[in-house]
Image: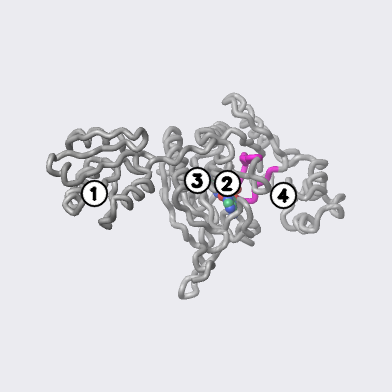
Amino acid sequence: MSDEELQPIKGMSDLGPPDIQLWQQLESSARDVLQLYGFQEVRTPIVEKAAVFVRSLGDGTDVVQKEMYTLTSRDGKDQYAIRPEGTAGVIRYVASLGQEAQGARFYYLGPMFRGERPQKGRRRQFHQLGAEAIGPSSPASDAEMIALHAHLLRNWGLKDFRISLNTRGLPEDRLAVQQGLSAALAPHAAQLCEECQRRLQANVLRVLDCKNEACKAIVASVPPVTAFMAPESRAYLDEVVRLLRLLELEVTVNPALVRGLDYYLHTVWEIAHPALGAQDAIAGGGRYRLTFGGREVEGVGFAIGLERAIMAVQHDVPAAPPARRQAAWIVSLGDRAFEENLRLLQTLRQHGVASGMDLGRRSMKAQMRAADRSLSAFVVVRGDSELDKGTFMLKDLGTGQQVEVELPELIERLRPRVVSL
Ligand code: HAM
């Protein structure tokens, strides 16, 4: 068999022990925090009609144009897409709920797919933890979502993240912003990179997040997007910033932050971590308005890229020692003990004691090796003499201490050891 056959598709990863433990810890801490803010989980399909994303994210966006994986139905009539993000599917679901959905708060967690060129922090399959709060525009609900976002990250032990904020204004501002920016950038067109010269015509906002140094300098010299917006849009952003200060959250207004999706209006934000290099955005969010089946839904939300967040956690939080997985490993001396121990294994598990034993009737040495591998806290040894007395030899692998006990005491001693990851 070649090595290649053993690998998943480029840009996608297998996820197993020991890394999965950290994923599970972060997921469970996130669920606790989301519950504090009144969010409930939703699971929407991974494959949707392509139009769900094309109409929501925008036809001209990079995600739709260059990165979305699409499928054609077997009869060739329908176009589907493997979800590149979670918001569009969740809001389609919210719209299907009708009036009931006003004020709904949903979170989701799962794989997303984008056909990008893989590099550190950029995967073709990655995972997002996202949250969406449905309701009309209000600076306080945007501020609350940013506070929740920071709460989640801080609860994971992240310290060194930075929140930057901007506004996309109202849909009515869009034309004025495009025209104003195009006019301001036009005199510098020749100094812009080739890609930005094209963007100047196709999607001028995208010039603002170009990484090229020359483009960045030009962008810094032209008025910020807010200069072309209606006063209400600027006031909305100011109010969000004021409320975030009230909540003692440190944020920086970055006039060049645009976010690459068309559904946004008013507040947009991004959270970056300096240890991650080029792909330093661990999360992004904003307020949006989407229409499905003639029903308009407004909300505010965010998504955390879990692979990137985990790299940041591994940087900021000292590695925890491997958790012990089992409370007890049962070791059998002799054939009689083996069968009695099979029954014991069942009894212990029925009493909530995480336990295991070697099922291959192997030597004592092999059984002890398996005990080691299982990371058990205790071993329970039984041979003929224990069977005759009706006792169990219980050894604490941490301290080396050994006691001989009967069944009720055995269960009592092991039960508090039910291990949570
Ligand atoms: P997004 O900024 O496209 O926003 O993605 C959110 C996060 O997903 C990014 O900050 C990043 O951490 C992670 N991410 C994106 N692409 C990749 C990739 N190829 N490999 C690894 N991680 C990646 C959204 O998706 C919006 N739906 C967020 C939102 C929710 N806005 C409102 N509600």
Disc 2 packing (10 Å; few <14; some 14–19; many ≥20): many
Nearest-to-viewer mark from 1 and 4:
1
For mark 1, give the secondary structure.
strand
Which of the two residues, 408 or 8, is positioned nearer the viewer here?
A: 408
Q: Is residue 261 magenta?
A: yes
Q: Position of residue 328 (x, y in %)?
A: 29, 42
Which of the two residues, 319 or 119, is positioned nearer the viewer here?
A: 319
Q: Position of residue 257 (x, y in %)?
A: 69, 43
Q: Is residue 350 left or right of residue 80?
A: left
Amino acid bearing label 1: Ser
Amino acid bearing label 2: Arg
Amino acid bearing label 4: Leu
- In whole angstroms, how far apart are the C-alphas of marks 3 and 2? 12 Å
Disc 3 packing (10 Å; few <14; some 14–19; many ≥20): some
Point 53% across, 46% down: residue: 306
For mark 4, give the secondary structure.
helix
In this view of the protein, can residue 269 be seen by the observer? no
What's drawn in magenta, residue-wise?
Answer: 257-274
Among all residues in the image, which is located at the extreme bottom? Answer: 75
Which of the two residues, 233 or 284, is positioned nearer the viewer here?
A: 284
Query: Does ligand 1 reach within 8 Å of label 2's beta carbon?
Result: yes
Report the disc number at residue 308: 2
Q: Position of residue 119 (x, y in %)?
A: 63, 55
